[in-house]
């Protein structure tokens, strides 16, 4: 599974809001972009930073219940159930977001983490 590109991650982060200032313009700190997939995003308005995890192959290996939960997510466009996980962002201790793709219609959308209640 290849890591997403920095440009793709930056563009898709624009679909969520900053935990601090609620704006939605983010960049990826280029110094944090490494093969381990642990990147750092920064809000262009208030300079708040938060981690973005892009190595989902590793994540799915270590969190065996996640694939089952992904099967429960319905596409916001075609209602197909079951999505693929592209990357995730931890916006705050209470808010982590999965960025997923519908394999049926290829719509990409953010999904609030279902793990929130366990954290
Ligand atoms: Zn901000
Ligand atoms: Zn769909």
Image: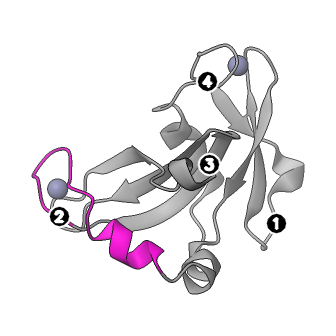
Kindly state the secondary structure of the residue where label 4 is placed: loop
| Disc 3 crowd, CA 10 A, few/some/many (<14, 14-19, 20+) | many
N-term mark: 3 or 1: 1
The answer, for residue 11, to whether it is visible in the render is: yes
- Which is more foreground, mark 4 or mark 2? 2
- Most prominent secondary structure in the magenta stretch? loop
Instruction: Kindly identify which numbered label has been placed on residue 64.
Output: none
Q: Report the span colored magenta.
A: 65-81
Tell me whether circle 3 and circle 4 mark residues in contact (CB < 8 Å).
no
Q: Is residue 119 left or right of residue 101?
A: right
- Residue shown at the point (70%, 41%) measured from the top left: 93
Say which of marks 3 and 1 sits in front: 3
Secondary structure state at the residue bearing disc 1: loop
The residue that label 1 is drawn on is 34
15, above or below 117, in the image: above
* Labels 4 and 2 touching (C-beta < 8 A): no
Task: Please state which of residues 17 and 6 is positioned toward the viewer in this rendering.
Answer: 17
Q: Any atom of ligand 1 within 8 Å of the CB at mark 4? A: no
Residue 113 percent location from the top left of the image: 48, 51
Q: To which quarter of the image does residue 48 belong? A: top right
Based on the picture, tell me whether residue 79 belongs to the magenta stretch.
Answer: yes
> Which type of secondary structure does the marked residue at label 2 adopt?
loop
Q: CA distance from mark 1 to mark 2?
A: 32 Å
Q: Is residue 84 left or right of residue 6?
A: left
> What is the spatial separation of the Cα atoms under label 3 and label 4, in whole angstroms?
14 Å
Q: Which residue is mark 2?
A: 81
């Amino acid at each position: 599974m290849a890591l997403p590109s920095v440009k793709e991650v930056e563009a898709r982060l624009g679909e969520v809001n900053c935990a601090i200032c609620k704006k939605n313009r983010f960049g990826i700190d280029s110094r944090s972009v490494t093969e381990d997939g642990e990147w750092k995003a920064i809000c262009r308005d208030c300079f708040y930073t938060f981690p973005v995890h892009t190595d989902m192959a590793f994540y799915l290996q270590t969190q065996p219940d996640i694939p089952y939960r992904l099967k429960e997510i319905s596409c916001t466009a075609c209602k197909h159930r079951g999505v693929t996980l592209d990357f995730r962002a931890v916006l705050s201790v209470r808010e982590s977001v999965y960025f997923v793709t519908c394999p049926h219609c290829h719509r990409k959308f953010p999904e609030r983490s279902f793990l929130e209640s366990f954290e």
